């Protein structure tokens, strides 16, 4: 099993990534405290954004002086709970540590399992069918038309044609922002689970997408992200392995 280091030892925290039963397995060692909290949270979030079946975090070698720091995994789960909704589970064979995690309430949102096998069994029981599609586009104005066509074709194929007008507006905003504010070649991701559709666009900029307000504080500017906010159930900007992913979730209530 090949492992890759995600956080260097100089940070007092070491995280290596491997694959276990198709899921992402992160092995964490070192000290989790106020100095390493954010880097561990972001590492878990980034692993989830790659959309594996699950992210398993082996915490058996993790030193946590303050019990409240276990909330780092609850925070990571909250950030990906809407999209991509990848389960995050902890693996820890030590019963005393598992009990400590449970006492601070983290186990209510991020289950603790004694081994990888039991964690993956729980994932298999809770899996929901998803359909995904992806297209990489050039950094060019033609990508605006290409992204709209891609979204329309996929949604029609998935028998979700009523959502096409809304989806085309949102993907147009996301791709246009990539072309205007980065030098990236945008990657468009489309996902369907049940009655919802998620539209996501990746770029190589680490700066999060932000909805700006008017300088006088009176009303929102008529920005693209203001339009996305009004047309979608929810939207967000999440750190990705090489930049960020901006996404929006559409439901039946978002028809145009």
Image (cartoon, rainbow, N blue to C red):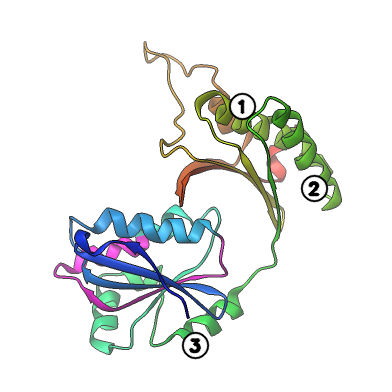
- Residue 252 on the magenta span: no
Observer-nearest residue: 183 or 189? 183
**Helix, strand, or loop for circle 3?**
helix
The percent position of residue 232, horizontal first and vertical second, equals 61, 38
Instruction: Look at mark 3 in the image and give the residue it sits on.
Output: 117
Which residue is painted at 45% across and 84% down in the image?
A: 116
Check if mark 1's residue and mark 2's residue have beta carbons within 8 Å: no
Please name which of the two marks, 1 or 2, marks the residue nearer to the observer.
Answer: 1
The percent position of residue 226, horizontal first and vertical second, equals 54, 26
Answer left or right for 130 relative to 227. right
Answer left or right for 223 relative to 16. right
The answer to which image quadrant residue 75 occupies is bottom left
Let me know if residue 27 appears in the view.
yes
Let me know if residue 230 appears in the view.
no
Say whether disc 2 or disc 3 marks the residue closer to the N-terminus.
Answer: 3
Instruction: Look at mark 2 in the image and give the residue it sits on.
Output: 154
Instruction: Look at mark 1 in the image and give the residue it sits on.
Output: 176
**Helix, strand, or loop for circle 2?**
helix
Q: CA–CA distance between discs 2 and 3?
A: 35 Å
The answer to which image quadrant residue 59 occupies is bottom left
Observer-nearest residue: 47 or 99? 47
């Amino acid at each position: 099993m090949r492992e890759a280091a995600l956080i260097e030892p100089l940070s007092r925290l070491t995280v290596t990534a491997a694959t276990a039963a198709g899921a992402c397995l992160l092995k964490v060692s070192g000290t989790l405290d106020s100095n390493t909290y954010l880097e561990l949270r972001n590492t878990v979030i980034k692993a989830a954004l790659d959309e594996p079946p699950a992210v398993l975090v082996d915490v058996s070698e993790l030193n946590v002086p303050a019990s409240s720091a276990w909330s780092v995994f609850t925070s990571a789960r909250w950030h990906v709970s809407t999209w991509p909704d990848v389960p995050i589970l902890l693996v820890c064979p030590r019963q005393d540590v598992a009990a400590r995690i449970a006492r601070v309430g983290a186990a209510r949102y991020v289950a603790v399992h004694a081994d990888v096998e039991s964690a993956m069994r729980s994932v298999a029981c809770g899996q929901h069918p998803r359909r995904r599609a992806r297209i990489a586009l050039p950094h060019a104005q033609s990508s605006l038309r290409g992204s709209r066509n891609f979204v329309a074709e996929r949604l029609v194929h998935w028998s979700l044609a009523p959502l096409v007008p809304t989806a085309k507006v949102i993907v147009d905003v996301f791709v246009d922002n990539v072309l205007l504010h980065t030098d990236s070649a945008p990657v468009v991701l489309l996902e369907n689970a049940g009655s919802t559709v998620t539209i996501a666009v990746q770029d190589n900029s680490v700066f999060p997408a932000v909805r700006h307000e008017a300088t006088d504080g009176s009303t929102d500017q008529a920005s693209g992200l203001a339009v996305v906010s009004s047309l979608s159930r929810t939207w967000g900007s999440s750190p990705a392995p090489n930049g960020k992913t901006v996404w929006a979730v559409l439901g039946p209530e978002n028809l145009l």
